[in-house]
């Protein structure tokens, strides 16, 4: 009897547990079933294929539409770095302007003083250095600036007369190349060593067409009877010219000048010294010295070694 009561309790407990878990089991099974079944596609959603046949009618899927209005071609409308005094060209390429040129105009405005420079192919400034350039059927609207100066640097706006107007900004940077000779203004060379003068042209948007060297105001001839004179020039963003003179002699002393075609010249004074005058006992040493073609500057260590040698020699 007790066993029968215990069994009824167990049965009642299992029945209650089944009632609680059954709905969750059913909904879980339905979800698993739904994974395998295809979902209904809304009538408004686009079909997967390009063309879908429905009831014998071919329906085209929507495709991206091309731009209908004018826009700037940024790849052909970039910032400009110009050389001081050399004509600069600021280009603005406008796409999709089409036959709307009669109604829409492309203009250039200088932001420094909000000055209207050009409209279409016409120039609206008294400064004759500025000029509008546009060829028929071309997408390029170019602003020409002759003899640019440092004050011309800044932002220029290419503007399309839409409503509202469209703008693209181009920055002009006018630079002046500078020339430096490494180790100047004075170089001291050990007699018999190789003179190595290095001229560097900086801040030039394009390499100089040529660089020539002067010695005491005379152009250096590389095939002179003296021999041993050569020049190596490496062109790039920074152009470097090396003047090499082998077996330096006192007659090689004097003023050397580096003359790039697109920058100011730079000078250095070379002193070729005899071997016994490199380290005078007076303790006065040249500020810069070349021995074996390399720059040499005496340090405190050299002074200590020299003083020790003199002390040992006198003791």
Image (spheres, helix red, strand yellow):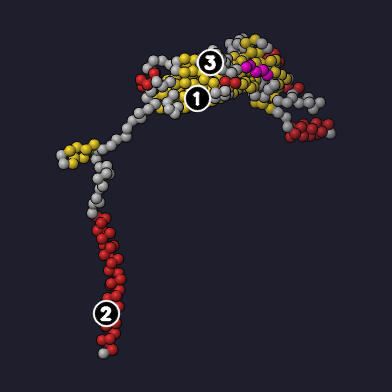
* Residue 24 higher or lower than 234, as above or below: below
User: Disc 1 vs disc 3: which is toward the camera?
Assistant: 3
Q: Which mark is residue 157?
A: 1
Q: Report if residue 290 lies within the magenta region.
A: no
Q: Which residue is mark 3?
A: 125
Q: Which mark is residue 109?
A: none
Q: Is residue 73 left or right of residue 49?
A: right
Residue toward you, 109 or 308: 109
Query: What residue is at 43 percent from the left and 27 percent from the top?
Result: 163
What span is colored magenta in the figure? Answer: 264-268
Query: What residue is at 26 percent from the left and 38 percent from the top?
Result: 61
Query: What residue is at 70 percent from the left and 15 percent from the top?
Result: 254
* Residue 57 higher or lower than 220, as above or below: below
Splitting the image into 4 quarters, where does residue 300 fall? top right
In the rendered structure, which disc, 2 or 3, sits on the residue that comes first in sequence?
Answer: 2
User: Disc 2 vs disc 3: which is toward the camera?
Assistant: 3
Distance from the alpha carbon under mark 2 to that under mark 1 = 88 Å
Can residue 314 be seen here? The reply is yes
Q: Secondary structure at mark 2?
A: helix
Residue 196 in percent (x, y) is at 63, 21
Query: What residue is at 30 percent from the left and 69 percent from the top?
Result: 21
Residue 207 in percent (x, y) is at 54, 20
In the rendered structure, which disc, 2 or 1, sits on the residue that comes first in sequence?
Answer: 2
Residue 200 in percent (x, y) is at 60, 22
Splitting the image into 4 quarters, where does residue 106 fall? top left
Residue toward you, 166 or 212: 166
């Amino acid at each position: 009897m007790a066993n029968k009561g215990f069994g009824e309790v167990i049965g009642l407990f299992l029945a209650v547990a089944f009632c609680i878990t059954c709905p969750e089991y059913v909904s879980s099974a339905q979800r698993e079933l739904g994974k395998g079944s295809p979902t209904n596609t809304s009538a408004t959603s686009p079909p997967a294929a390009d063309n879908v046949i429905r009831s014998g009618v071919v329906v085209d899927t929507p495709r991206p539409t091309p731009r209908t209005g004018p826009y700037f071609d940024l790849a052909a409308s970039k910032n400009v770095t110009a050389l001081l005094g050399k004509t600069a060209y600021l280009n603005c390429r406008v796409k999709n302007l089409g036959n709307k040129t009669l109604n829409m105009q492309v203009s250039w405005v200088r932001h420094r003083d909000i000055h209207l420079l050009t409209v279409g192919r016409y120039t609206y400034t008294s400064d004759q250095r500025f000029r509008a350039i546009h060829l028929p059927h071309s997408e390029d609207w170019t602003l020409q600036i002759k003899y640019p100066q440092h004050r011309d640097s800044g932002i220029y706006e290419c503007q399309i007369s839409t409503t509202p107007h469209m703008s693209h900004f181009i920055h002009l940077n006018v630079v002046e190349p500078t020339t430096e000779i490494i180790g100047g203004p004075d170089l001291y060379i050990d007699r018999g060593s190789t003179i190595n003068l290095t001229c560097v042209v900086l801040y030039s948007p394009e390499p100089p067409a040529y660089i020539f060297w002067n010695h005491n105001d005379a152009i250096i001839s590389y095939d002179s009877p003296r021999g041993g004179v050569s020049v190596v020039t490496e062109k790039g963003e920074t152009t470097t010219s090396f003047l090499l003179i082998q077996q330096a002699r006192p007659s090689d002393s004097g003023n050397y000048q580096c003359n790039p075609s697109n920058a100011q010249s730079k000078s250095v004074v070379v002193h070729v010294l005899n071997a016994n005058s490199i380290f005078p006992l007076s303790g006065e040493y040249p500020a810069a010295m070349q021995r074996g073609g390399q720059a040499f500057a005496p340090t405190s260590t050299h002074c200590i070694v020299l003083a020790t040698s003199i002390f040992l020699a006198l003791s």
